[in-house]
Image (cartoon, grey):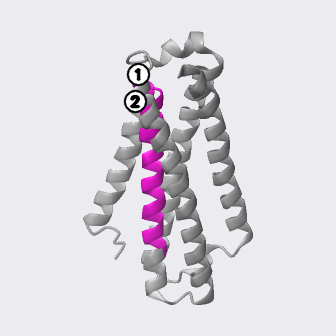
Amino acid sequence: MENNLRYFLPAFLLMFWGIVVFWEISRNRKKNLQNLILAEKDLTKFKIIKRTYRFYKILLSFLSLIVIVFCYLPAYYSWFIPFFSLNPILNIFGLLLLNLSLIWIIVAQLYIDKELFKISIDSKNVNLIKLFFYSNKMLTSGILLMFVGFFLSITSLSTLIICILAFLIFFYNRSKHANGLVRYS
């Protein structure tokens, strides 16, 4: 099982980073959403979403470092304080979650692109902007699922901390929205 993880995890990260970079580049070539949304509250929501994804990218960078050490420098993996030797049941469940999260993220990205296209046609339609923010919630839940999948695949204190930080970022932004500072609805 350990050898399967050593091949699968770097391949997964390459695919995931490729998808993230591909969609970011393609969106940057299209019209900028900040120029399309005229209401200040929607622009604030969009900036919060961008900042949240920046934090997720930082966490994913640390996770990538852990995967590289786990796969290519196994002697140094003990620095990340592994919980227990690789449990095959947890690893398989983690790999399933990673695959599910990749599919979920691709579907969410396609949905976001569809909503962005609709918004670019009719930027004053409030319902379209709400759909865009809803589709971002879908993407965030796929990213959180990915962090859980990585934690279950290579269980260590470092991956647990990264997973907890991802959820803290999510719940912090959610509580900010619930307290009326920013509303999605």
In the visual, does 39 lie left or right of 167?
right
Most extreme residue toward the top is 75
In the visual, does 158 lie left or right of 62?
left
Label 2 crowding class (10 Å Cα cut-off): few <14, some 14-19, many 20+? some
Q: Is residue 158 above or below residue 145?
A: above
Q: Position of residue 68 (x, y in %)?
A: 62, 26
Find disc 2 in the rendering and name its residue.
90
Most extreme residue toward the right is 29
Q: Which residues are magenta?
A: 132-159
Find disc 1 in the rendering and name its residue.
87
Q: Nearer the viewer, residue 101 or 30?
A: 101
Q: CA distance from mark 1 to mark 2?
A: 5 Å
Amino acid type of the residue that numbered disc 2 sits on in the rendered structure: Leu
Amino acid type of the residue that numbered disc 1 sits on in the rendered structure: Asn
Q: Position of residue 65 (x, y in %)?
A: 59, 29
Most extreme residue toward the left is 179
- The residue under the point 50% across, 57% down is 104
